[in-house]
Amino acid sequence: MRPVLRYSFALSTLFLFAPATPAAAAVCTVPSGSHPTIQDAVDDLSCTEIVIAAGNYVESVEIDRNLEINGVSSTATVIEGRIMAMGAGVELRLSNLKVDAGATSSAGCFPVAVDIGDGATLAGSDLIAINAYGDACLLFGDGFESGDTGAWGNTVP
């Protein structure tokens, strides 16, 4: 009985002092059960690369870490919103995507489709960023933006 105990102890000690191996970089897909949105995958720190299926995604994405985001192609994978990456040392790579900040279904109304700042950098290929800022960003949708406020009179505080 004692030899077995000594062997078990020696084996557990060996594992206790074995060097840890770094975790493999994770490729996350969107949409998926664990990442239904692009932002869900961005927020998952284990995702180092995000692969987005063909389709339109009505969301705006905020990134504050190094990341690679790939679609199928700039005609097949469309983000209707904006992408914003901020922070010193943040490296973002976007490929095979279209970012349309002025789409009528866009998740917000932004003057910039891809906003990179505060020391962040962007690289990529097959990337289209468009923004038909204007009518797509109506506040009221009734033409008020092109008229005057006289009809409101004293009803606006």
Image: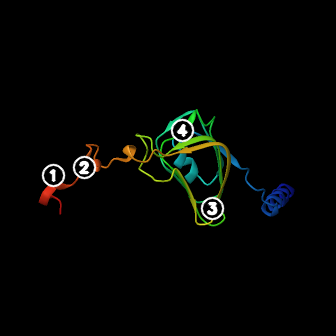
Q: CA distance from mark 1 to mark 4?
A: 39 Å
Which sits earlier in the primary sequence, circle 1 or circle 4? 4
Q: Position of residue 67 (x, y in %)?
A: 65, 53
Kindly indicate the quadrant of the structure image that contains residue 31.
top right
Kindly indicate the quadrant of the structure image that contains residue 16.
bottom right
Looking at the image, residue 22 sits to the left or right of residue 73; the answer is right
Going by the numbered disc 4, the residue's amino acid type is: Val
- The residue at the point 81 percent across, 56 percent down is 8
Residue 17 is labelled as: none
Between 146 and 90, the one nearer to me in the picture: 146
Residue 151 is labelled as: 1
* Pointers 2 and 3 in contact (C-beta within 8 Å): no
User: Mark 4: which secondary structure?
Assistant: strand
* Pointers 2 and 1 in contact (C-beta within 8 Å): yes
Q: Which residue is mark 4?
A: 78
Can you see residue 32? no
Which sits earlier in the primary sequence, circle 4 or circle 3? 4
